[in-house]
Amino acid sequence: MQHHDPVGTPEGEAGAALKSRLTVAENVLATLAVDLDAELLFADGLLALTETRLIARDTAGGWHDWPLAESGLALHLHDHAGVGTLDLTGAQGLLARWRYTLVHQTAALRLLKLFEQRSASVAQVTADAADAAEREDIAAGETEAQTPPSTWVLLRLGRFARPYRKQLIAGFLLTLASTAATLVPPYLTIPLMDDILIPFQNGQQIAVGKVAMFLTALLASALAGWALGWARTYLLALVSERIGADLRTTTYEHLLTLPLDYFGGKRTGDLMARIGSETDRINVFLSLHALDFLTDVLMIAMTAVILVSINPLLAVVTLVPLPFIAWMIHVVRDRLRTGFEKIDRVWSEVTNVLADTIPGIRVVKAFAQEKREADRFREANKYNLQVNDKLNKTWSLFTPSVSLLTEIGLLVVWGFGIWQVARGRITVGVLTAFIAYIGRFYTRLDSMSRIVSVTQKAAAGAKRIFDILDHVSNVPEPANPVKVEQLQGQIEMKGLGFRYGSRAVIRDLDLTIRPGEMIGLVGHSGSGKSTLVNLICRFYDVTDGAIKVDGTDIRRFAVADYRRHVGLVLQEPFLFFGTIAQNIAYGKPEATREEIVAAARAAHAHDFILRLPHGYDSLVGERGQGLSGGERQRISIARALLIDPRILILDEATSAVDTETEKEIQKALDNLVKGRTTIAIAHRLSTLRKADRLVVMDRGEVVEVGPHDALMEKQGAYWRLYQAQLRQADEEDADAAAAERSAVAAVLHTHAAHPAGEA
């Protein structure tokens, strides 16, 4: 057996508690600090490996342990965008899950390696490569499509119903009362038949007073049933609308908290369908079908009680088809459950085509691809039709089968009832009442069978909604955030590292930026410039080291509070549908018109805005398509100016415009960078000459730092980049000059061939 030197137990309260739990001969081989809880908030936990077991202290302070000799015990390690996950699985499935920041990744890898070695030694077995690959896939995160929707997911909607529990209780009581009112008329048919009509056929006089009393009771029950039914339908419809609205709002608000990498793996149309059509489907289920189902259950239960009270034997005969219908519902439900979720996914593909094509209609038309996009939509729609047709085969057979069983049940009741009347065991009035109740009973039973379809649709929709709500951000909020008052803008990066999965993008980066300093980030594509900016904005969290602003780790700030002090100007500015003024004031909605105009003036946007038909109240169209690229960029600069950020990020802010427009934008940028800590990314190195220092990056590392002139004298990486751009510019100028000479030569040739007099 391989020997491992003990690494010792950690210091502090957790370490002392761990030592007290060890046996005399038990040594700790590896430990892992678990510094995130299930909600990805910072917390204190501990995981330790000894020769014989895993010992864990959860973030709530409880202790757990698992013997390594336990059958099927395995650890699965996965990390993504700054958060590591360690899953412990056994024969029963997932036993425990720990999350940690990737500062502790080395400790996690060591613990995993030693765990596998100890497990192999204890169990005397090794896992084959296929099993290891399968475990890795499980650790990588379950895909939403792998878990079939369960009807029980609808119970999770209870958290949204809880604020309306008083109204729901009132609705239930109204449902109970209205159902009871509708069950009165059949019961009154017994005395009407036995005491009024049948005696009249035998020669007795009709008692007008009794008839009036019974008819009045029938009218009163009908009116009571109508009033109570209207009240409960209206009340529960109001409640369900509010539950649906809360569900949409909560889902959208949670979606806005998720990190950028979540949206990178999702289609816009799919997310729109979830928040829109799926919540509408759930709302319809709650407002209509769930209410009908509750009424059906109460009606069947109360009818069954009345039937048994009238004649137990006849009631038993009445309920004969019920087990067969229940069995059919159980069989069909499983097929519908998976079928409706597949329909939802296929419908999302149809929506995705629309979400892709409509915003990109200019490109579609420019490349004459209308027919191609129409064919793509037709194929998606055709597949949607095929999936629906396949499910409808099952559903179309199920509904008539239930109706057939209910009709057979009614015939059985008629036959058995007539036999009972002939033997004198029941009266005609009792049989008549039974038939009336049976009609209602089987009608409700048939209605309940039909609700299987809408229930499974709602369950599939609820699962897709909760797939969003269950996704936690990998940019955790601190448990006790440091309040951001006023930043000076000093940024310090020490030992910085970041990885996308297993690919290292930033490696051991050290950089300090002084308050008010302008830094230019340069380097080849893929060198890590944009990733570094994303880390400073805290779109992702670092996996190694830390980023400190004014001496405080940015992970200790509340995300929203910190980002209010960071301005961002992108290469492709995004404008929302609305007015010019609304877009400028996006980061500060309460801004006055004077503040908006001042920001626009500083961004050199005021003049062109006044030339628009309605000035600052002009609509810019979706994504700002009513403006040129340079105009959109200047509005985005005005938007950044208005919030007055202490830290400014310029990501290729002038790369997508012509030279004249670049000059206008550069004037606006000169106003924007004054007095702010600025980090600018630019491919055109000439635009960074005003930077205090240039930071040259290559493969995630800083290779040179200094002002332009010093780096040019050094003739290193920056000098080579600069020379390469000069050569490229010279080649472009030469090509342009050659093209111009060719055009002039062509004109001269034309004039020579056709003198002016001949023309």
Image: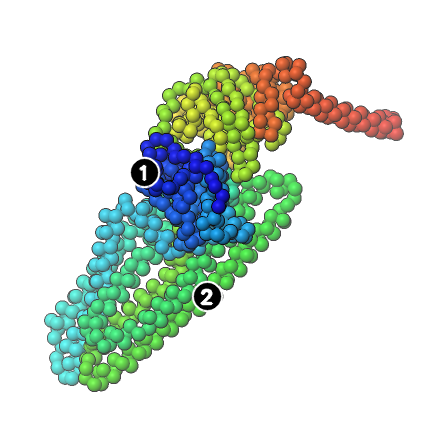
Q: CA distance from mark 2 to mark 1?
A: 62 Å
Name the side, left or right, on which 558 lies relative to 225.
Answer: right
Amino acid carrying label 1: it is: Ser
Q: Is residue 633 visible?
A: no
Q: Residue at x 41, y 66 (%)?
A: 331
Q: Earlier in the sequence, mark 2 or mark 1?
A: 1
Q: Residue at x 18, y 62 (%)?
A: 220
Front residue of 122/361: it is 122
Q: Secondary structure at mark 1?
A: helix
Q: Quadrant of residue 258?
A: top left
Q: Quadrant of the C terminus?
A: top right
Front residue of 555/75: it is 75
Front residue of 28/85: it is 28
Q: Which residue is mark 1?
A: 20
Rendering coords of residue 465 (x, y %): 41, 47
Q: Residue at x 42, y 44 (%)?
A: 51
Q: Which residue is mark 2?
A: 394
How busy is the neighbourhood of tag 1: few (under 14 within 10 Å), some, or many (20 plus)? few
Instruction: Determine whether 399 is above or below 496 in the image.
Output: below
How busy is the neighbourhood of tag 2: few (under 14 within 10 Å), some, or many (20 plus)? few
Name the side, left or right, on which 173 lies relative to 73.
Answer: left
Q: Closer to us: mark 2 or mark 1?
A: 1
Front residue of 56/364: it is 56
Amino acid carrying label 2: it is: Thr
Q: Residue at x 35, y 34 (%)?
A: 15
Instruction: Determine whether 596 is above or below 415 in the image.
Output: above
Instruction: Determine whether 346 is above or below 37 in the image.
Output: below
Q: Secondary structure at mark 2?
A: helix
